[in-house]
Amino acid sequence: MSKKLVAYFSATGITARIAENFADSIGADLFAIIYTYNRLHKRRLGLDGQKFQK
Ligand SMILES: Cc1cc2nc3c(=O)[nH]c(=O)nc-3n(C[C@H](O)[C@H](O)[C@H](O)COP(=O)(O)O)c2cc1C
């Protein structure tokens, strides 16, 4: 386990590749921040329009 960590967010995979290469070149661990925001979250936050607002 390294003392260095590269944490990244990537939706398309482009940043993921850069992060992987970077982590590899400096001997760091890699941590992917996963995108979980979806329509359900939108509904909970009341951001999905009048239809879903109480
Ligand atoms: C749903 C969604 C919303 C985003 N909103 C923003 C934003 O408001 N401002 C911003 O600078 N980048 C935004 N991004 C871009 C990301 O922060 C990040 O730069 C990008 O997804 C990484 O590139 P990659 O997915 O091509 O690897 C968003 C990405 C997604 C998937």
Image (cartoon, rainbow, N blue to C red):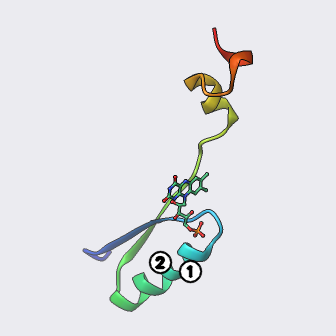
Q: Secondary structure at mark 1?
A: helix
Residue 34 position, x and y percent, is 55, 55
Measuring 57% from the left and 51% from the top, which residue is drawn there?
35
Q: Identify the amino acid type marked 1.
A: Arg
Left or right of 23 on screen, residue 41: right
Examine the rendered structure and indicate whether residue 49 appears above or below residue 8.
above
Residue lying farthest top?
Answer: 54
Gap in angstroms between the C-alphas marked 1 and 2? 5 Å
Residue 32 position, x and y percent, is 49, 63
Residues at marks 1 and 2 touching, judged by CB atoms closer than 8 Å: yes
Measuring 66% from the left and 39% from the top, which residue is drawn there?
38
Q: How many marks?
A: 2
Tell me, for residue 17, which label it has, or none: 1
Quadrant of res 44: top right
Measuring 59% from the left and 45% from the top, which residue is drawn there?
36
Residue 40 position, x and y percent, is 67, 30
Q: How busy is the neighbourhood of tag 2: few (under 14 within 10 Å), some, or many (20 plus)?
A: many
Measuring 48% from the left and 86% from the top, which residue is drawn there?
21
Q: Secondary structure at mark 2?
A: helix
Q: Identify the amino acid type marked 2.
A: Ala
The quadrant of the picture occupied by the N terminus is bottom left
Of 19 and 30, the residue lying toward us: 19
Ligand 1 is found in the corner quadrant, namely bottom right
Residue lying farthest bottom?
Answer: 25
Left or right of 44 on screen, residue 25: left
For disc 2, the marked residue is: 19
Residue lying farthest left?
Answer: 3
Quadrant of res 14: bottom right
Of 33 and 27, the residue lying toward us: 33
Q: How busy is the neighbourhood of tag 1: few (under 14 within 10 Å), some, or many (20 plus)?
A: few
